[in-house]
Image (cartoon, rainbow, N blue to C red):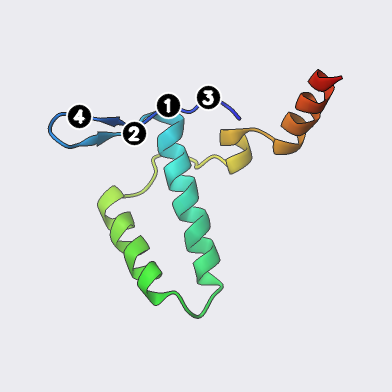
């Protein structure tokens, strides 16, 4: 897995989310929203996601894919297996 910045709690209670971690948050929300759009149930979760979207706003720029953010799991598995030999 690629390096991810950690979220930082500030003394005033705010949460600072930097760089690729911010992109990962927006990617997770977008993937969840797309999955919920295909379902008939989940009204409460849809409402919660909409409220979170209203608070966060839109991601600025093109949202990277999860593979771009986290790395390719198949390549990582192959790399780990090669290191064991």
- SS under mark 2: loop
Q: Is residue 44 above or below residue 52?
A: below
Tell me which corner region of the image, top left, top right, bottom left or bottom right, holds residue 82.
top right
Which residue is disc 1 drawn over? 5
Left or right, 70 with respect to 77, comes to left
Say which of 35 and 78 sits in front.
78
- SS under mark 4: loop
- SS under mark 1: loop
- Quadrant including the C terminus: top right
User: Could you tell me if the residues under marks 2 and 1 are in contact, i.e. CB atoms within 8 Å?
Assistant: yes
Which residue is disc 3 drawn over? 3
Cα separation between marks 1 and 4: 15 Å
- Badge 3 crowding class, 10 Å Cα cut-off, few under 14, some 14 to 19, many 20 or more, is few
Q: Position of residue 77 (x, y in %)?
A: 76, 33
Which residue is disc 2 drawn over? 17
Disc sitting over residue 50 in the figure: none
* Circle nearer the N terminus (2, 3): 3
* Circle nearer the N terminus (1, 4): 1
* Residue occupying image coordinates x 36% and y 61%: 49
Q: Is residue 60 in view?
A: yes
Q: Position of residue 83 (x, y in %)?
A: 80, 19
Q: Position of residue 67 (x, y in %)?
A: 63, 39
User: Could you tell me if the residues under marks 4 and 2 are in contact, i.e. CB atoms within 8 Å?
Assistant: no
Which residue is disc 4 drawn over? 10
- Badge 1 crowding class, 10 Å Cα cut-off, few under 14, some 14 to 19, many 20 or more, is few
- SS under mark 3: loop
User: Could you tell me if the residues under marks 3 and 1 are in contact, i.e. CB atoms within 8 Å?
Assistant: yes
């Amino acid at each position: 897995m690629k390096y991810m910045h950690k979220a930082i709690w500030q003394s005033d209670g705010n949460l600072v989310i930097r760089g690729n971690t911010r992109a990962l948050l927006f990617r997770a929300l977008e993937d969840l929203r797309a999955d919920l759009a295909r379902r008939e149930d989940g009204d409460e979760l849809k409402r919660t996601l909409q409220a979170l979207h209203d608070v966060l706003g839109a991601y600025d720029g093109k949202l990277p894919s999860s593979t771009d953010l986290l790395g390719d799991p198949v390549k990582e598995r192959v790399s780990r297996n090669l290191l064991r030999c």
